[in-house]
């Protein structure tokens, strides 16, 4: 038996493993650290075996952020072409916002000329945008640790997880660490009194969305402050296009009507404390507009046609004024300024 | 080599084992029929050692993968990496050391090399776990399979070859089912990488695993590229090619009779599955929908179907030349139905006449009935139990299939079973008569 070929193959097997581990170890030490926020998209089933499935906000790329060839993928949708796009390499250009979080700037089929970027692969591409995975969506851990993290995700409902990754010069990202955001956001939908039982044979009528009671929680072990502007002006609506074609946008999106905060607007939350805010969606501030009809008038959620109500899906974003706006006010140093997004809800009172 | 010679050689081995003839006498008898002497018992492969040691190595490797999957929090990252590299290098070093020795230790070395390849696979998943890599996971199976394939060739190892077959099948299926991206290379790697090894090592086991994998991957890939119609044509062509290869192997490679039997098994198996399905109206309709517009990669499906068609036809032309013109080969009459079915199937599919579904299903019914009756006839005439039983089973299967879709009334169903029962009784009488005529037990 000639042993040289066996020796060569055994050596190649060792090299393959070294090639997998070596560059990533190098990136961990030398790569650019970025903090990415995971969206609370899949809160009901965050575990699969002994790893946590991480859904980043940058996994879902709306058509407006697609550049170059990727813009054509979402513009001219074709089933056969879309199938061929699976696993195509794409590059997500990132920018770091004022709160230290990396946000998606654009998605292209070539690396951006400047700035940090992550290499990813296309999962799906359609008229709603491109779903991309970056190879950092699984966080493996011991099964007991995974169970603890699962418990934590229930205890800290509505608190996003921030993930630190190291990014190499070729765009490969390696997951380094995770931390929980101390501030969490949850909501309860207003339930109007039950309608009389419909007569037999009558179709079921979904309940319209009239309002929400939003709760901000301090899950941390230190005091923190929130800014609760009058009339819920610390909050805004973001259309959700993750799973369906949403044809509505928030009518108040472009209006910059956030007033200057006062001392009374700043609420300090002790560890474990929470603060509730009620948002009345029948008020014009929360009306929405059909994006398919140019010049369409804003309407409240309850006026959305039944055929569109399920796909009229939004998230609520707690977006307090920036540090400059609260400077000089009491407890300004405790205010968390980073925006915080809720789970999605739709016009039929459905929640993701 | 004809079947009588094969039978005689097997009998000589039995006589020798039972002490009826000596080694020298056995060799003289073999020589009389132009056969080389049987290999000495000292040279034979220690199959027990090989099989159990290889199976043990693979099971240990699976256990190690599960142990690593537990993700020991107490072991630091570099400790885990050191463990996996040490296990991989240790297994291969031990294997290479034993391979350099003679006798049974070589086979133990082969088993250790298989264990090393399992550690290599465990290492792929462990490194992915350590660095939280969530890449395209079928690639893990592909790289593992390539490592096993390379080791199989370096060692001429059946155990590593079997591992490679399984891993390449898993890779091909996960690409097709989980990602809807059927991989052309899965079929090509199994065919090109493992068929020659099985042939060279004269391993019927590796050949059987390889043929099963090719059949599976072919169906999975082609149905994704070109729809169900291409799955029928490609599988039928593959079946006809395999039976041709089996007949040529029987004739030209008597030292690999087991391989010929495996090819015939998979060839006839695939042929009957296709023909049986096409005897149903709906499946026949889908065959007539061959030229489809809305399939992802019709060109690739066509390339596979037509390549296999050309190879299968070429094989049977070669057999026809040698059996009909040169009189070198003896081919059973019913075997000729296979190339005829191939030509018919491709012809009817290429014509794209959608209204002919009933006609096509009836023609495949007749084809199956033809093979069944010819098998039964030949089995009775030659007093061979296997074709007699297989023919009867096939006839029963066809009648049972038609029970539900052709015979509408209970009266016609009852009549069909009475006729089938009558055929079986007549067959039993004929078989008994022919066996008695040849001097055997009734």
Image (cartoon, coloured by chain):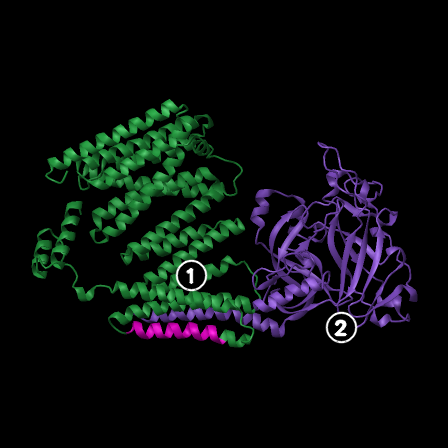
Chain colours: A purple, B green
Which label belongs to residue B325?
none
Task: State which quadrant residue B304 falls in.
Answer: top left
Q: Nearer the viewer, residue B413 or B5?
A: B413
A41 up-or-down from A35: above or below:
above
Check the residue under mark 2 and report the chain it is in. Answer: A
Q: CA distance from mark 2 to mark 1?
A: 51 Å
Check the residue under mark 1 and report the chain it is in. Answer: B
Q: Residues within 10 Å of mark 2 (few under 14, many from 20)?
A: few
- The residue lying at 81 percent from left, 60 percent from top is A319
Which label belongs to residue B146?
1
Asked if the magenta segment contains residue B99, the reply would be yes
Residues indicated by labels 2 and 1 sit on the same polypeptide chain: no
Residue A350: x and y, percent? 72, 47
B347 up-or-down from B49: above or below:
above
Left or right: where does residue B9 sit relative to residue A140? left
Q: Residues within 10 Å of mark 1 (few under 14, many from 20)?
A: some
Task: State which quadrant residue A218 falls in.
Answer: bottom right
Left or right: where does residue A232 sit relative to residue A111? right
- Magenta range: B82-100
Q: Main secondary structure of the magenta part?
A: helix
Residue A299: x and y, percent? 84, 42
Residue A199: x and y, percent? 74, 33
| Residue B309 seen in render | no
- Disc 2 is placed on an element classified as loop
Left or right: where does residue B193 sit relative to residue A227? left
Q: Quadrant of the C terminus of chain B?
A: top left
Left or right: where does residue A46 sit relative to residue B47? right
Task: State which quadrant residue A30 falls in.
Answer: bottom right
- Disc 1 is placed on an element classified as helix
- The residue that mark 2 highlights is A221
Q: Nearer the viewer, residue B23 or A199?
A: A199
């Amino acid at each position: 038996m000639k042993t040289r070929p066996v020796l060569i193959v055994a050596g190649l097997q060792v090299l393959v493993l070294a090639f997998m581990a070596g560059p990533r170890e190098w990136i961990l030490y030398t790569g650019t650290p970025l903090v990415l926020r995971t969206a609370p998209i899949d809160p009901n089933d965050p575990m699969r075996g002994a790893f946590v499935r991480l859904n980043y906000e940058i996994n879902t790329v709306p058509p407006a952020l697609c550049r170059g060839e990727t813009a054509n993928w979402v513009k001219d949708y074709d089933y056969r072409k879309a199938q061929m796009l699976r696993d195509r390499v794409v590059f997500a250009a990132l920018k770091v916002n004022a709160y230290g979080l990396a946000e998606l700037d654009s998605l292209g089929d070539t690396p951006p000329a400047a700035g940090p970027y992550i290499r990813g692969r296309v999962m799906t591409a359609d008229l709603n945008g491109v779903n991309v995975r970056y190879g950092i969506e699984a966080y493996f851990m011991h099964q007991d640790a995974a169970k603890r993290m699962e418990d934590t995700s229930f205890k800290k409902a509505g608190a996003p997880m921030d993930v630190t990754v190291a990014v190499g010069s070729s765009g490969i990202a390696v997951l380094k660490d995770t931390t929980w955001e101390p501030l969490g956001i949850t909501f309860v939908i207003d339930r109007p009194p039950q309608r009389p039982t419909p007569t037999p044979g009558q179709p079921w009528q979904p309940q319209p969305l009239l309002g929400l009671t939003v709760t901000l929680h301090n899950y941390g072990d230190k005091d923190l402050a929130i800014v609760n502007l009058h009339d819920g002006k610390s909050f805004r609506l973001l259309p959700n296009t993750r799973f369906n074609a949403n044809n509505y946008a928030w009518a108040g999106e472009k209006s910059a009507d956030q007033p200057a905060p006062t001392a009374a607007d700043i609420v300090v939350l002790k560890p474990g404390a929470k603060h509730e805010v009620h948002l009345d969606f029948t008020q014009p501030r929360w009306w929405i507009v059909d994006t398919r009809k140019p010049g369409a008038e804003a309407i409240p959620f309850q006026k959305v046609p039944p055929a569109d109500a399920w796909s009229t899906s939004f998230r609520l974003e707690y977006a307090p004024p920036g540090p400059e706006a609260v400077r000089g006010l009491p407890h300004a140093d405790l205010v968390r300024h980073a925006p915080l997004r809720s789970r999605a809800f739709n016009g039929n009172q459905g929640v993701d | 080599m004809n079947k009588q010679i094969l039978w005689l050689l097997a009998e000589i081995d039995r006589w020798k084992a039972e002490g009826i003839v000596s080694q020298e006498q056995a060799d003289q008898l073999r020589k009389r029929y132009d056969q080389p002497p049987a290999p000495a018992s000292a040279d034979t492969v220690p199959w027990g050692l090989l099989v159990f040691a290889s199976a043990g190595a693979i099971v240990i490797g699976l256990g190690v993968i599960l142990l690593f999957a537990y993700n020991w929090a107490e072991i630091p990252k570099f400790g885990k990496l050191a463990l996996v590299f040490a296990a991989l290098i240790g297994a291969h070093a031990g294997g290479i050391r034993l391979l350099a020795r003679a006798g049974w230790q070589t086979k133990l070395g082969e088993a250790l090399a298989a264990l090393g390849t399992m550690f290599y696979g465990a290492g792929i998943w462990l490194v992915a776990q350590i660095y939280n890599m969530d890449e395209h996971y079928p690639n893990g199976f592909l790289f593992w399979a390539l490592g096993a394939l390379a080791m199989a060739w370096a060692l001429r190892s059946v155990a590593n070859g079997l591992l490679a077959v399984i891993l390449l099948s898993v890779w091909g299926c996960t690409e097709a089912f989980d990602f809807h991206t059927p991989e052309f290379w899965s079929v090509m790697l199994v065919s090109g990488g493992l068929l020659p090894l099985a042939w060279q090592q004269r391993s019927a086991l590796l050949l059987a695993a390889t043929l099963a994998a090719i059949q599976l991957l072919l169906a999975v890939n082609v149905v994704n590229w070109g729809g169900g119609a291409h799955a029928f044509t490609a599988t039928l062509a593959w079946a006809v090619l395999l039976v041709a290869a089996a007949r040529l192997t029987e004739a030209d490679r008597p030292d690999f009779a087991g391989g010929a039997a495996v090819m015939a098994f998979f060839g006839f198996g695939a042929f009957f599955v296709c023909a049986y399905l096409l005897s149903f109206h709906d499946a026949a309709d889908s065959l007539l929908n061959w030229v489809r517009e809305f399939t992802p990669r019709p060109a690739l499906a066509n390339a596979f179907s037509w390549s296999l068609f050309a190879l299968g036809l070429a094989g049977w032309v070669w057999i026809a030349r040698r059996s009909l013109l040169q009189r070198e080969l003896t081919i059973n009459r019913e075997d000729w139905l296979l190339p005829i079915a191939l030509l018919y199937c491709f012809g009817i599919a290429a014509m794209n006449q959608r209204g002919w579904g009933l006609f096509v299903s009836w023609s495949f019914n007749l084809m199956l009935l033809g093979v069944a009756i010819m098998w039964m006839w030949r089995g009775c005439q030659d007093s061979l139990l296997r074709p007699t039983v297989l023919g009867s089973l096939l006839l029963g299967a066809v009648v049972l299939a038609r029970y539900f879709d052709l015979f509408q009334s209970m009266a016609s169903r009852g009549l069909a079973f009475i006729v089938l029962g009558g055929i079986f009784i007549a067959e039993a009488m004929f078989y008994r008569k022919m066996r008695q005529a040849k001097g055997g037990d009734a």
